[in-house]
Image (cartoon, rainbow, N blue to C red):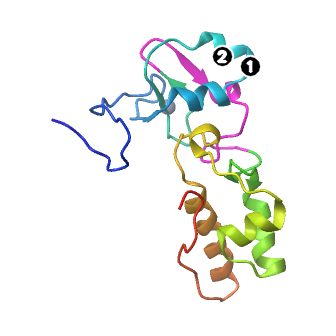
Amino acid sequence: MSSDCGCGCDCKDNDPKECPECGEEGKEVPLKTMINLLDKNKKNEITGEDYHLCMNPDCFISYYSDSKSFTVKDVRQPIWFKKGSKPKIACYCNNISYAEVESAVIEHDLKTWNEIVSAYRDNKICECEKFNPTGECCCSQNFYEVVNQVLESTGKEPVSPEDQCCG
Ligand SMILES: [Zn+2]
């Protein structure tokens, strides 16, 4: 059986792997992502295996393979969906937090990824494979979640994701 994710990448048949700590099925991540995000003195512990990211918010494991696992403390950036992650980062490429997205919406009435990133950064970067803990683009998804939460809580109409990070 072959699986095709449709993104044109060289995905192998997905080999689901469970987290050695919590037993939940993780998400495969590119090696490039791990190498960039792991703490400097942990990098030499990476084995030449496939790594997965534990997506369970309550579990302290970040990346793991068959023989090796790293914790959330071994990663240089807080992983936004893990319990207690601080600050909660909405866009890793441009290092923008949930709090910054919120204040852009509340104080400046900005609503799109483009407007909000531009408000904080002169140059917008989009390199999710390198900077996002999952190795995939989920910045825009996180962004619009925050934007719409704020809009709804202030009685305004939610927006649909118009422009996106990697769009
Ligand atoms: Zn886990």
Q: Which residues are magenta?
A: 65-85
**What secondary structure is found at the residue carrying circle 2?**
helix
Q: Is residue 122 left or right of residue 93?
A: right
Q: Quadrant of residue 59?
A: top right
Label placed on residue 143: none
Q: Which of 146 and 130 lies nearest the eye of the viewer? A: 130
What amino acid type should be assigned to the residue bearing mark 2?
A: Lys
Residue farthest toward the left in the current orientation of the protein: 1
Can you see residue 68?
A: yes
Mark 1, other Cα within 10 Å: few <14 / some 14–19 / many ≥20: few
Residue pointed to by mark 2: 43
What amino acid type should be assigned to the residue bearing mark 1?
A: Lys
Q: Which of 114 and 61 lies nearest the eye of the viewer? A: 114
Find out if the beta carbon at label 1 lies less than 8 Å from the nearest ligand 1 atom.
no
User: Measuring 79% from the left and 72% from the top, which residue is drawn there?
Assistant: 104
Q: Quadrant of the N terminus?
A: top left
Circles 2 and 1: CB distance less than 8 Å? Answer: yes
Residue 31: where, in percent of width, then height? 52, 26
User: Measuring 55% from the left and 61% from the top, which residue is drawn there?
Assistant: 141
Residue pointed to by mark 1: 40
User: Measuring 46% from the left and 11% from the top, which residue is drawn there?
Assistant: 67
